[in-house]
Amino acid sequence: MDPERFAETCRRVVAGEALSGGIGALGEKSLHLAVKCYFQPDPGKREVPVGPYVADAWTAEGIVEVQTRSFQRLRPKLQAFLSQGPVTLVYPVPAQKTVSWISEDGTVSPPRKSPAKPQAGHVLGELYQLRTFLTHENFRLCVLLLQVAEYRLLNGWSKNRKRGSTRYDRIPLALLDEVWVRSPREYAQLIPPELPEPFTSRELGKAVGLSPKKGSCAANTLWSVGAVERVGKRGNAYLYQKKTL
């Protein structure tokens, strides 16, 4: 973890100094580009062809892929990459976020703090789509907890134009923490330590900042990799607790 280098990388991305080299730079969102540059500063080793696919970066530790959502799209690429060697999937989490609104005339509102504070375990809701790969010997996961400034267009369908609005960009400002998962037993560290056991999927989801539906995916992800076990039911809901290793 190198917060100073991450901050400098963000400064360069915002200034447009990190765009040279590699396809995908022009029009790429700031958050994705900054994270990619943090893991691989050399533009010649970003957007690297690997078989029929293009990897975000190639480092001394192997392939790096940055993904913020829609993990199911990553399945064919990940299957190909894992056969080549170590692959690190990086998931940025806006643990601290401000939101500014951009009106139709281009006016930008002052930033306001978002009440949402997702934790590292937020990634579990997305990992459900990749659960068949999570115990592969070449798979690594890195969750970055970030301070982020988000800008949204004031073009939504609600009266105040905020609901259904379009996210324009997310500017990363600081690296707060890194959480690494390098083996199946380490997925348990994505469970908040303050969450009482046993817990339901809904309770897990609430603790990490997920909807009830995503919370169910999160619990099933942990169960599928053997990080938790089912120890009964509360009503119709399974009860989970960390598996003793």
Image (cartoon, rainbow, N blue to C red):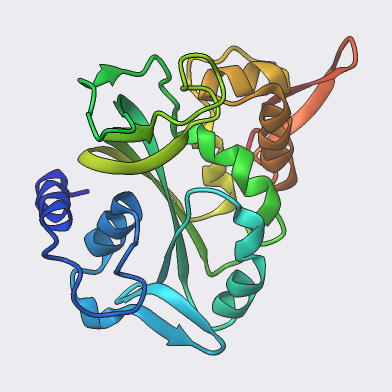
Which of these two is toward me, 187 or 10?
A: 10
Q: In the rendered view, would you say 66 is above or below 241? A: below
Q: Residue at x 80, y 28 (%)?
A: 230
Which of these two is toward me, 66 or 234?
A: 66
Q: Residue at x 9, y 46 (%)?
A: 4
In the rendered view of the protein, which quadrant contains the C terminus? top right
Task: Examine the image and state in which quarter residue 26 appears.
Answer: bottom left
Which of these two is toward me, 193 or 9?
A: 9
Q: How many dots with numbers?
A: 0
Task: Examine the image and state in which quarter residue 158 appears.
Answer: top right
Q: In the rendered view, would you say 76 is above or below 208? A: below
Coordinates of residue 222 in the picture (x, y in percent):
66, 39
Give left or right: position of 164 versus 28.
right
Coordinates of residue 98 in the picture (x, y in percent):
28, 24
Q: In the rendered view, would you say 129 is above or below 80? A: above
Coordinates of residue 116 in the picture (x, y in percent):
43, 19
Which of these two is toward me, 56 or 81?
A: 56
Coordinates of residue 163 in the picture (x, y in percent):
53, 23
Q: In the rendered view, would you say 62 is above or below 231? A: below
Give left or right: position of 173 versus 61.
left
Q: Given the current orientation, which residue lies at the most extreme right position?
A: 236
Q: Residue at x 89, y 9 (%)?
A: 235
Q: Residue at x 48, y 86 (%)?
A: 50
Give left or right: position of 8 versus 61.
left
Q: Given the current orientation, which residue lies at the most extreme front position?
A: 105
